[in-house]
Image: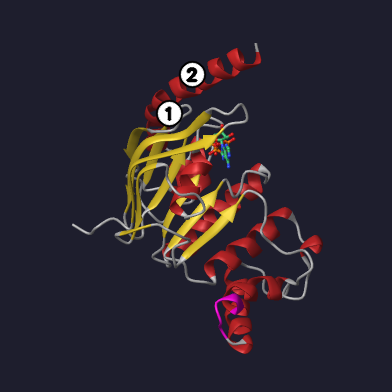
Amino acid sequence: MVPPLIELTGATKRFPSGSGSVHTAVRDLTMTVQPGEFVAVVGPTGCGKSTTLSLVSGLQPPSAGRVQVNGEDVKSIPDGVGYMFQTDAVMPWRSVLENVASGPRFRGVPKAEARAQAVDWIARVGLAGFEKYYPHQLSGGMRKRVALAQTLVTKPKIMLMDEPFSALDVQTRALMQDELLRLWSGSGAAVIFVTHDLDEAIALADKVVVLTSSPATVKDVFEIPLERPRKVEELRLTEEFRKLYADIWESLRSEVDKAREKGASNVA
Ligand SMILES: Nc1ncnc2c1ncn2[C@@H]1O[C@H](COP(=O)(O)OP(=O)(O)OP(=O)(O)O)[C@@H](O)[C@H]1O
């Protein structure tokens, strides 16, 4: 069996809270991601999804347990990791071309080569002709395409995606989900994709990890045996999809209810 590319074993993350006490954001979390696997992580609001990603990215060290990438403990940002967040990491003062070329440039690729790679990826995400545009001249969906090109141009082995499409309207979002699947399918990259949206998780992933309400730990892991290539909007209408949705929602719903109850008692 292929060893996992990413492995969290009993990972726990505690933060000092304002009152001098300690807040546990992630508790005893164990999960694996294989090379090239697309894993979606769902859980109630505020349960610890982003914190889980920050453990894998090396932005936060675990307070207990183990986080490994490529069989080694994560001590700093591992090589070959690309990120995409809800808010764009697109630099407003740089053109599309400069934005996409900046990753390779930062990694020491000579200027002409970095620009050639950027031109290639700008075309692959469907933005050929927009190289000289600035982010404010683009729609939200186009900016997401720039962000995708920015991430993919560095040929990451791991893509960490934190609700990257949640700010988009429904139609643009479906388009971007298809685009992501198309581009990912040739990349061989492993993906951890955090989302609130169970539809999105099932449509994209090989495996959906359901986290508990705060502090997050793994409640269930569901395999998604839907064929690829997938067209997300057509897929959603299939019986197989609805059945998976019903099963996973059954697991997620009680955690969402618990989170709501806790939220209500915090407000009360
Ligand atoms: N750097 C930090 N310092 C202190 N507390 C933090 C820090 N980062 C996260 N937390 C706390 O950890 C908990 C989990 O936060 P996290 O952002 O991981 O949840 P989430 O599931 O991604 O949230 P959402 O669903 O709103 O995106 C929250 O209570 C949050 O306030």
Residue drawn at the location 55% of the way across and 35% of the way down: 16
Determine if the magenta segment contains residue 202.
Answer: no
Question: Furthest-left residue in view?
Answer: 1
- Packing grade of label 1 (10 A; few <14, some 14-19, many >=20) is many
Front residue (pair 214, 255): 214
Location of residue 142 (image quadrant): bottom right
Per the rendered image, the range of residues in magenta is 105-109
Residue 223: where, in percent of width, then height?
32, 41
Assign the magenta stretch its main secondary structure: loop
Q: Is residue 6 left or right of residue 1?
A: right
Disc 2 residue: CB within 8 Å of ligand 1: no
Amino acid under disc 1: Thr
Looking at the image, is 198 positioned above or below residue 71? above
Residue 118: where, in percent of width, then height?
61, 77
**Disc 2, SS:** helix
Q: Assign the C terminus to one quadrant of the image.
A: top right
Q: Which residue is mark 2?
A: 258
Location of residue 224 (image quadrant): top left
Location of residue 120 (image quadrant): bottom right
Residue drawn at the location 77% of the way across and 75% of the way down: 132
| Marking on residue 253 | none
Q: Are marks 1 and 2 in contact (CB under 8 Å)?
A: yes
Instruction: Determine the quadrant in which ligand 1 lies.
Output: top right
| Marking on residue 212 | 1
Q: Is residue 114 left or right of residue 58?
A: right
Front residue (pair 40, 78): 78
